[in-house]
Amino acid sequence: MKLYTNFNNDPIAKKEIDNAWQEAKKEAKGKNPFAPGRIKEALDAYKADMNKKDN
């Protein structure tokens, strides 16, 4: 527990975590799997793939 507390109180570690979080958010922007239309596109692709396998 002490290690965890020391890590959380370390300003350098906090800054590194914050930087990593900001970079992850930038990379994930626009990649929301639940964005409107994405689920429908995935279902349509799945159905098309299943139709190919049935034929």
Image (cartoon, helix red, strand yellow):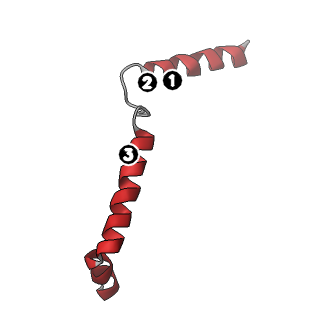
Q: In percent of the image, x 44 and y 34: which residue is there? A: 31
Residue bearing mark 1: 42
Residue bearing mark 3: 25
Looking at the image, residue 25 sits to the left or right of residue 46; the answer is: left
Residues at badges 1 and 2 in contact (C-beta under 8 Å)? yes
Q: CA distance from mark 1 to mark 3?
A: 23 Å
Mark 2 or mark 3, which is nearer the start of the sequence?
A: 3
Q: CA distance from mark 3 to mark 2?
A: 21 Å
**Amino acid type indicated by mark 1:** Ala
Q: Position of residue 52 (x, y in %)?
A: 70, 15
- Quarter of the N terminus within the rendering: bottom left
Q: In percent of the image, x 42 and y 49: which residue is there? A: 24
Which residue is at the front of the view, 54 or 14?
A: 14
**Amino acid type indicated by mark 2:** Ile
How many neighbours does mark 2 have within 10 angstroms: few (below 14), some (14-19), or many (20 or more)? Answer: few
Q: In percent of the image, x 40 and y 42: which residue is there? A: 26
Q: Taking 29 as reference, is 52 above or below it?
A: above
Q: Position of residue 37 (x, y in %)?
A: 41, 19
Q: Taking 4 as reference, is 37 above or below it?
A: above
Q: In percent of the image, x 30 and y 83: which residue is there? A: 6
Going by the picture, which residue comes out furthest to the right? 55
- Quarter of the C terminus within the rendering: top right
How many neighbours does mark 1 have within 10 angstroms: few (below 14), some (14-19), or many (20 or more)? Answer: few
Q: In which quadrant of the rendered view does residue 17 lie? A: bottom left
**Secondary structure state at the residue bearing disc 3:** helix
Q: CA distance from mark 1 to mark 2?
A: 5 Å
Residue bearing mark 2: 39
